[in-house]
């Protein structure tokens, strides 16, 4: 997660540029498929370097897809751009910015460049005892590494060797963008020496004082004890492990809570805040859709106040995104709009009130559109209805019918009083034990077995109508008789939840919505780690 956190932050910025500011963005990801660590790993694993690089490249892009990071416009690999690296080195040698050593290694001459230290202000240390004897200056860095036994190599004018780490990015980016690029990004751990060296060699190569117009650096991901999450420390969490109990939306919200340049403390408190925010946003979209569909009675709404809040939110969001992509302010503004809408959306009217579909629909549309810009999306029932796929449209109709039927059964099961009285009840104590035994028997569906024979007449010594019972006893009997129906309704609700569909009961009506991409394990956790498909499952009572 420590690596992909950086990519999620920049994916959010890319989406803002494309979808909010309507800028056409061309993104390039450079893949280092040859370096010291890769060579060492291939040796330890007794496989080829190509096998190692392809495996981890596929794993990387698979993780990015699971976290909903948009694919880059262009993918470059170092081994496919070695000719560009050679051209880059040769030009720097020709203009005096680089030199070749006896071993065939090529170094960039920092002092000859004269403009080194834009980002870091690192002081030079020319102590001969600490400096590589081949270097002219201690800050000089490698452009081309001379061949070492057992390592892969390419031919060059200076002998066998391979590209240095810093030059590969400059050579590949220059091949795609030319002498200038708008934005260069990375984690703040790359400011020195990597980005410092990139800027220096690129300015020298293109004979310019400005290679990248903007450098964007993300903060680090830290653990709760202040230790940086890093592969070298073996304290990382894989994307697969994270998504077992969390969602891509929740991690994106973690990245939205703080500005992209800030460090993120990976703590339980942060995750809980992200989960609570995600739940609030998801519930709002489901409730607002249910209100617009007529499944939720709410209000009355203060429409002028709500529309004023929406207008202020639009202004705040625009100003925040223009201020170095301040997603913290944006998220707070969105949550405030949601809270204002929820004040009326969660009211239960005592009598019929006018529908405020216009105001609620406008707020819902703006919230979902803005969240989508950040890559935070919630499945919409409307999207299913308007889908061109026949299967999707059929699913919507089936779900509508199922939820309607369940709602009718549930309302009947919960209705008490004279209008819903039970038909029969044993009145003779000597037959009570036998009748209780029959009532406890259930079918495979969990419903009680009805009597084999109905009563012959009202005066039968075994049967009598409940009209002779006390009202409290009558309601108690009704509740007991209909309890299996209520339980069956709860079980099917939980089974649908596991399948990714959430059913919400709203008084005498019910609605359904899609849950999104959270894992089955996470859904079971929300049900108290029970599986509704197990025979002994008992549904959680709803508060």
Image (cartoon, helix red, strand yellow):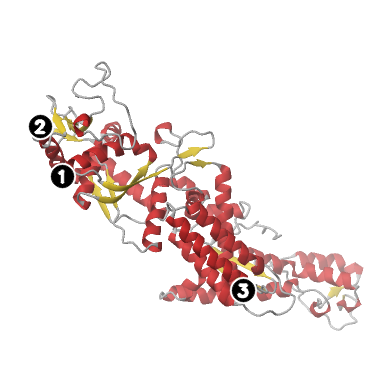
Q: Which residue is mark 3?
A: 303
- The numbered mark, 3 or 1, whose residue comes first in the sequence reads 1
Return the disc, 1 or 2, that comes first in the chain's sequence.
1
Q: Which mark is residue 34?
A: none
Secondary structure under the numbered disc 2 in the rendered image: loop
Question: 24 left or right of 233?
Answer: left
Residue 208 appears left or right of 13:
left
What residue is shown at x 40% (from left), y 58% (from top)?
A: 16
In the rendered image of this protein, does residue 146 appear above or below residue 85?
A: above
Towards the viewer: 542 or 267? 267
Q: Position of residue 281 (x, y in %)?
A: 56, 60
Please identify the quadrant where the N terminus is shown.
top left
Q: Position of residue 448 (x, y in %)?
A: 73, 69
The label on residue 158 is 2
Q: Are marks 3 and 2 in contact (CB under 8 Å)?
A: no
Quadrant position of residue 339: bottom right
Give the secondary structure at mark 3: helix
Distance CA(mark 1)–CA(mark 2): 15 Å
Residue shown at 59%/53% (left/top)? Answer: 276
Q: Position of residue 474 (x, y in %)?
A: 86, 72
Q: Is residue 509 left or right of residue 212?
A: right
Residue position for label 1: 84
Residue 45 vertical position relative to residue 321 in the rendered view, above or below: above
Quick check: 182 above or below 228? below
């Amino acid at each position: 997660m420590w690596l992909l956190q950086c990519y999620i932050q920049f994916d959010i910025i890319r989406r803002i540029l494309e979808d909010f500011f309507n800028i056409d963005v061309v993104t390039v990801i450079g893949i280092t498929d040859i370096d010291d660590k890769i060579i060492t790993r291939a040796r330890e694993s007794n496989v080829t370097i190509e096998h190692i690089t392809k495996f981890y490249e596929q794993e990387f892009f698979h993780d990015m897809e699971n976290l909903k990071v948009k694919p880059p416009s262009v993918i470059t690999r170092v081994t496919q751009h070695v000719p560009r690296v050679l051209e880059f080195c040769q030009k720097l040698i020709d203009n005096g910015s680089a030199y070749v050593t006896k071993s065939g290694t090529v170094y960039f001459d920092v002092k000859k460049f004269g403009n080194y230290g834009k980002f870091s202000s690192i002081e030079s240390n020319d102590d001969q005892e600490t400096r590589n004897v081949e270097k002219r200056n201690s800050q000089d860095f490698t452009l081309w590494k001379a061949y070492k036994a057992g390592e892969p190599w390419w031919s060059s004018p200076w002998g066998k060797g391979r590209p240095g780490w810093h030059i590969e990015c400059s050579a590949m980016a220059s091949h795609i963008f030319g002498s200038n690029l708008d934005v260069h990004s990375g984690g703040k751990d790359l400011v020195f020496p990597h980005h410092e060296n990139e800027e220096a060699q690129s300015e020298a190569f293109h004979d310019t004082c400005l290679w990248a117009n903007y450098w964007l650096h993300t903060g680090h991901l830290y653990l709760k004890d202040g230790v940086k999450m890093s592969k070298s420390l073996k304290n990382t969490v894989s994307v697969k492990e994270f998504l077992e109990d969390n969602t891509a939306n929740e991690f994106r919200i973690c990245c939205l809570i703080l500005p992209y340049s800030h460090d993120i403390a990976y703590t339980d408190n942060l995750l809980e805040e992200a989960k609570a925010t995600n739940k609030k946003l998801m519930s709002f979209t489901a409730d607002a859709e249910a209100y617009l569909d007529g499944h939720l009675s709410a209000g009355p709404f203060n429409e002028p106040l709500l529309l004023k809040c929406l207008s202020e939110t639009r202004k705040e969001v625009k100003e925040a995104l223009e201020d170095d992509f301040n997603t913290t302010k944006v998220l707070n503004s969105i949550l405030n709009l949601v809270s204002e809408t929820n004040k009326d959306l969660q009211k239960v009217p005592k009598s019929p009130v006018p529908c405020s579909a216009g105001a609620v629909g406008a707020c819902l549309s703006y919230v979902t559109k803005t969240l989508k810009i950040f890559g935070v999306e919630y499945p919409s029932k409307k999207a299913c209805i308007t889908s061109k796929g026949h299967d999707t449209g059929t699913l919507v109709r089936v779900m509508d019918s199922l939820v309607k039927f369940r709602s009718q059964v549930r309302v009947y099961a919960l209705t008490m009083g004279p209008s819903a009285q039970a038909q029969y009840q044993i009145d003779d104590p000597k037959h009570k034990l036998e009748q209780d035994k029959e009532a406890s028997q259930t079918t495979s569906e969990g419903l009680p077995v009805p009597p084999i024979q109905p009563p012959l007449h009202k005066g039968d010594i075994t049967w009598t109508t409940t009209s002779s019972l006390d009202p409290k006893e009558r309601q108690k009997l009704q509740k007991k008789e209909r309890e299996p129906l209520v339980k069956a309704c709860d079980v099917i609700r939980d089974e649908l939840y596991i399948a990714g569909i959430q059913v919400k009961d709203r008084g005498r009506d019910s609605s359904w919505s899609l849950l999104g991409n959270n894992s089955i394990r996470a859904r079971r956790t929300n049900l108290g780690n029970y599986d509704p498909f197990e025979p002994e499952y008992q549904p959680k009572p709803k508060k």
